[in-house]
Amino acid sequence: MLGTCKLCGAENAKMARSHIIPKRLYGKTLAPNPKGSVDTVIARFDGLEKPKRSPKGEYDTTLLCSDCEARFQYLDGVGAKVLYQSHWSGVHFDSTTKRPKLLESDSGRSNDFRLFLVFLLWRMSATQRQMFSNVKAQKLESLWARALLEQDVSVARNLDCILVKFERSDNPLMGPARQRHDGVNGYKVLFAGYSIWLKTDERPLPTVFKKASAFKGQKIRALHMKFDDSPEKRALLKFIDADTGVDGLKFGEWAEINSKLDK
Ligand SMILES: [Zn+2]
């Protein structure tokens, strides 16, 4: 299929079949289907009357030309490597349970990982797929595109995120759910083993969350959480049980975790 690439602007270009959330992040993400078996699923649940499901994942054939897809595919590889193949060790511990509360990756590819997040954000914002229609970041979208085309993450000013690593990796994909905190906009997405809140606001992270930012210098960090204890699990159960939508997760629960981090 020929089309115009939304990233590089090439016209009459051969278009690629681009997954919005890269398949490598699906892992063994599972959700029960009506037949009682399990599927990989992407679910969108914020404020919709009926949560949307996409059992096969979401891809867009009007987003990227095949040259751009080939050029930037490595970033999805970097994302998967950092998330699933790097070693995460505890840097802050709960003083009573001795369980790690904050983890640090030994991956040295912080800048590439940030660029991967830019690529993910850009796809979520630029796609016309209905599953992502709540992601609106037009002002930043062109900055993200420039950061990608110039391969320079510093162009994506104020990129930040909060990463939560679960102890298991079979949680379903969910999102994007719009979540604001202290007036700062962002979207939460869940993929295998992780929940991520991506800031889509030029303002910096609210002070209370700064300590939980995934980025500290060149380090990549993640809050550590049992999926069974997480607000994501509760939202998921609601999603599975309810006929009507769930109006997002309570971000305050993350603030609570953050405030409990060892000094
Ligand atoms: Zn292109």
Image: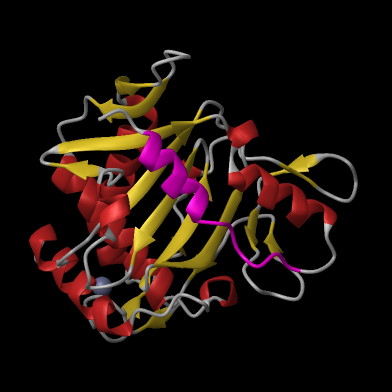
Image coords of residue 169 (percent x, y): 55, 31
Question: Image point 32% across, 51% down: which residue?
Answer: 209
Q: Quadrant of residue 77?
A: top left
Q: Going by the image, does 129 lie left or right of 212? A: right
Start and end of the magenta stretch? Answer: 245-260
Question: Image point 51% across, 35% down: which residue?
Answer: 193
Q: Nearer the viewer, residue 72 or 3?
A: 72
Considering only vertical position in the picture, is 44 above or below 237? below
Considering only vertical position in the picture, is 209 above or below 219? below
Image coords of residue 156 (percent x, y): 16, 66
* Residue 157 seen from this side: yes
Q: Quadrant of residue 203?
A: bottom left
Image coords of residue 184 (percent x, y): 34, 70
Q: Going by the image, does 47 lie left or right of 82? A: right
Q: Is 255 included in the stretch rendered in magenta?
A: yes
Report ligand 1 position as a quadrant.
bottom left
Check the image and tell me how it is coloured. Answer: secondary structure
Q: Is 226 included in the stretch rendered in magenta?
A: no
Considering only vertical position in the picture, is 8 above or below 34? below
